[in-house]
Image (spheres, helix red, strand yellow):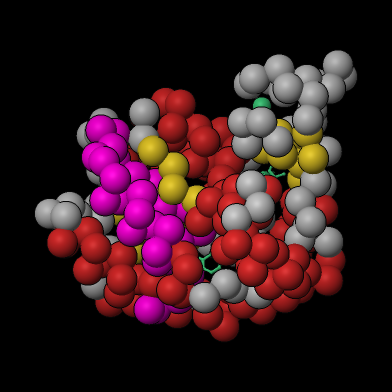
Amino acid sequence: TNIILLGPPGAGKGTQAKRLVEERGMVQLSTGDMLREARSSGTEMGQRVAAVMDRGELVTDEIVIGLIREKLTSGAAHGGYIFDGFPRTLAQADALGALLSELGQSLDHVIEMRVDDEVLVARITGRSTCGNCGEVYHDVTRPVPADGKCVNCGSTEIKRRADDNEDALRTRLLAYYKQTSPLIGYYHAKGQLESVNGLAAIEAVAAEISGLLGSQT
Ligand code: AP5
Ligand code: ZN
């Protein structure tokens, strides 16, 4: 089963993707994580995209399509792929469709995570992430344990993201509405769009997604 998690910054895509990895053995493909990895390992591409990401703008289609192509062609995922934060433009959606059919694979669910803008600021500005394993925390709804250690891997390297400030978030939201939200109509027209209430508690959102996926793997 290959799925897309579609939604604005802070909708909970990464949080739900991590759960699906643990519960169903799916493989998370987050273009945001891949780009941040490229930055921290100091690759030429990573340096090129750093400023764009920190402003909250989208990096070029060419770069992210290249990253996804590389992952998809380098081996099969048994539990299927979770596309998290990709596609984000119509060109990326077309490229994903072409790539999957080239590989004889299908796109099984496009799940839109519906949220209101008002909650996003609080979610994003309260977020921190484990620098070692990527586990996602929130100051209020999912605090880091008192000993400062990641629940998943025990690392104490829990950090805030450079683009999680109000200025960059405003740009990220604009980019979402302008460049990404047309994908809702795109997948709806193909009869592939499903949606869940992203405002519910993390567990409840997970249950709703599970209901859509059923027992299939
Ligand atoms: P990316 O890393 O994809 O960031 P994003 O889309 O802005 O999404 P986020 O990671 O901020 O949010 P999320 O939905 O994963 O929320 P999370 O689960 O963490 O992209 C970053 C940048 O990279 C882009 O701006 C762009 O520059 C570049 N980029 C990436 N992909 C690209 C592409 N395809 N094309 C071009 N450029 C690209 O949750 C947020 C917080 O809320 C957490 O603290 C969490 O604990 C909490 N939370 C989650 N769910 C709930 C809930 N149900 N109730 C209460 N709290 C919750
Ligand atoms: Zn960790």
Of residues 52 and 188, the one nearer the viewer is 52
The residue furthest bottom is 178
Q: Nearer the viewer, residue 107 or 96?
A: 96
Residue 3 screen position, x and y as percent? 34, 50
Q: What residue is rendered at 16% in x and 61% in y? A: 101
Total residue callouts? 0
State the image coordinates of residue 49 (x, y, percent, origin top left).
63, 67
The quadrant in which the C terminus is found is top left
x, y percent for residue 33: 57, 49
Q: Say above or below: 145 vs 215.
A: above
Query: Vertical placement of 86 versus 61: above or below?
Result: above
Visible residue check, residue 142: yes
Ligand 2, image quadrant it occupies: top right
Is residue 210 visible in the rendered image? The answer is no
Residue 139 image point, x, y percent: 83, 38
Closer to us: 213 or 17: 17
Residue range (magenta): 65-91
- Quadrant of res 32: bottom right
Residue occupying image coordinates x 36% and y 49%: 71
Tell me where residue 110 sits by quadrant: bottom left
Q: Is residue 108 magenta?
A: no
- At x 30%, y 74%, the residue is 94
Asked if residue 84 lies in the magenta stretch, the reply is yes
* Residue in the image at 64% along x and 47% along y: 41
Give above or below for 82 relative to 141: below
Quarter of the image for the N terminus: give it: top left
**Toward which corner of the image does residue 202 lie, by quadrant?**
top right
Furthest-front residue in this view = 44
